[in-house]
Amino acid sequence: MIDAERILQETYPDFNLGKHNQLAVKALKKLLHEDDFNEVIDKNRHLRGYAFLDKLLGYFNFHYQVSNQSFSNIPSEGRLLIVANHPIGTLDGLALVKLIRSVRPDVRIVANRVLSHMEPLQSIFLPVDVLSDKKALKDSYKAMLDALENEEAVIIFPAGEVSRITPKGIRDGKWQNGFVKLAKKARCPILPIHIKAKNSALFYSMSTLYKPLGTMLLVKEMFNKKDQEIKFVVGAPIPYTVIEGSEQSNKQLSQRFRKHVLNLGKKHKPLLFDTVATVVHPADTKAIKKALFQSRLLGETRDGKKIFLYRFQDDCPVMQEIARLRELTFRTVEEGTGLALDLDKFDIYYSHIVLWDDQALDIVGAYRIGEGPKIMQSHGIEGFYSSTLFDLHTEFAALLPFSLELGRSFVQPRYWGQHSLEYLWYGIGAYLREQPDIKYLFGPVSISNAYPQLAKELIIGFYQQQFGTELPQATAKTPFIISEQCRQFVAQEFNGDYSSSFKILNSELRKLGVKVPTLYKQYVELCVDKGCHFIDFNIDPDFNNCIDSLIMVEIDKIAPKKRQRYIETTLLH
């Protein structure tokens, strides 16, 4: 319940609630509409969180407008920090929660102490109060960071107070820079939103005369907003790497964000940060399942996941969901196309090994397969994705009719560490079992550009040294160059056998805070007699400048235990 006396005492602990100040308390109760609020709460005491929020907005008959483009800019999952101006100071925040909630279920909003006294909404609020002591502020910061690291969306009004009238119109005051620090710490994108709304002339007049008086009128303004509507303009997300790489201070960045949000609300005004396209929102899971189950079932794992061989169909939700999840997953490791979908022309005539979780109704991951014999016949060398990254020489091309190109593999982050990549390999093995003429597997395997430069050089130098190929060559279109200093280190330290050299590599990478990419290790350990070859290394500007290693695996050199496990074992249980 709303208790004006308690709010007053907590906010101003030195205020004397004695008999002489009861008139002030009564006035505060009226300003805060204590009886009206408590009536709404009492009538809906069985509701909490978002359910109560809907009832509260319904009580005010308060609505919002948002364009289709703005709506599509809201990321449907993953950690996200949302910053906005604060023109109303009350219902704008609650309506913004409802907007984000219409896209994703995990939104929280940073609320001051007065708002957080609305007990039914406490599960939505992350309380913070600029009047609190340092420990309380530290606890509030930790709560926000924890929410982001839990992959939730957090809404912050960086001004810390409602917008006021200025000579240039209704504007937020200076933005506090804590949100910039928070985004850097959580390594999360920032979603800018401009809210078009305003309070009454009385509010701005009183605020001009005496700012605290304007603040006390906010709840009255809230009740004046019955049967009204506001408009949201949602910008494209700003990757945290944009601010992390900036030479500006957090204070300068916060004011730049303020202007960016202000410009969102104006036509033809330049935006001040580089952005990326929001990954499209997911399709209906039942539609995905229905379409996927029309594909060929390759097998089923012991824990009930199904492995399908999917081929492209027009207007099919399966391919869109694969492309959506690819982009989300690759962005997690700072790769990705930066587009709304990771979808290209090769997806149309390539096949896809798809791992499906029937309990969660979710695509766990996928592998793209280019069938060499068919592609050579219908498209030639340029029909292979690898040809966009590497010049495939004549001798290499001669192997393509006996090869499968693998690539674009991903496993959703929520399924990492659950044997999902291994399950996809079961699917590849089931496919290979039916293709005895296939002798080679090849394709690009990437290292994120987020790796330190030295780490990239060490990894590439190691695999060049240990698994450089004597097979027909291909040449990178944009080759990755190792420094002479690192080349000398590689020649001296990685010239032993694989096991001892790998230990040295791991030790060096640990100092840099990274590990060998999983697929590098997996492809090498798939084979005996160095049956995995690293041919060349290319910088891919269309994939956030990741490093692509062109590898080739000789199928007849797959280790016997691996062959038995992946190729010769039937998956249908």
Image: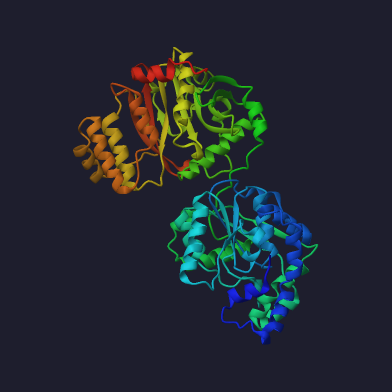
Dividing the image into 4 quarters, which one contains the N terminus? bottom right
Q: Write the residue at 28% across / 38% down.
A: 461
Q: Position of residue 108 (x, y in %)?
A: 59, 56
Decide: is 406 above or below 412. Answer: above
Q: Position of residue 191 (x, y in %)?
A: 58, 55
Decide: is 116 above or below 545. Answer: below
Q: Position of residue 256 (x, y in %)?
A: 53, 65
The answer to which quarter of the image holds residue 345 is: top right
- Left or right relative to 443: residue 256: right
Q: Position of residue 3 (x, y in %)?
A: 67, 70
Visible residue check, residue 288: yes
Decide: is 550 above or below 559. Answer: below
Q: Write the residue at 71% across / 75% down.
A: 217
Q: Looking at the image, which residue sits at the far front?
A: 19
Q: Looking at the image, which residue sits at the far right?
A: 227
Q: Nearer the viewer, residue 470 or 143?
A: 143
Visible residue check, residue 398: no
The answer to which quarter of the image holds residue 234 is: bottom right
Q: Write the residue at 49% across / 27% down.
A: 382
User: Disc count in the image?
Assistant: 0
What colouring style does the render use? rainbow
Q: Nearer the viewer, residue 276 or 75?
A: 75
Decide: is 440 above or below 261. Answer: above
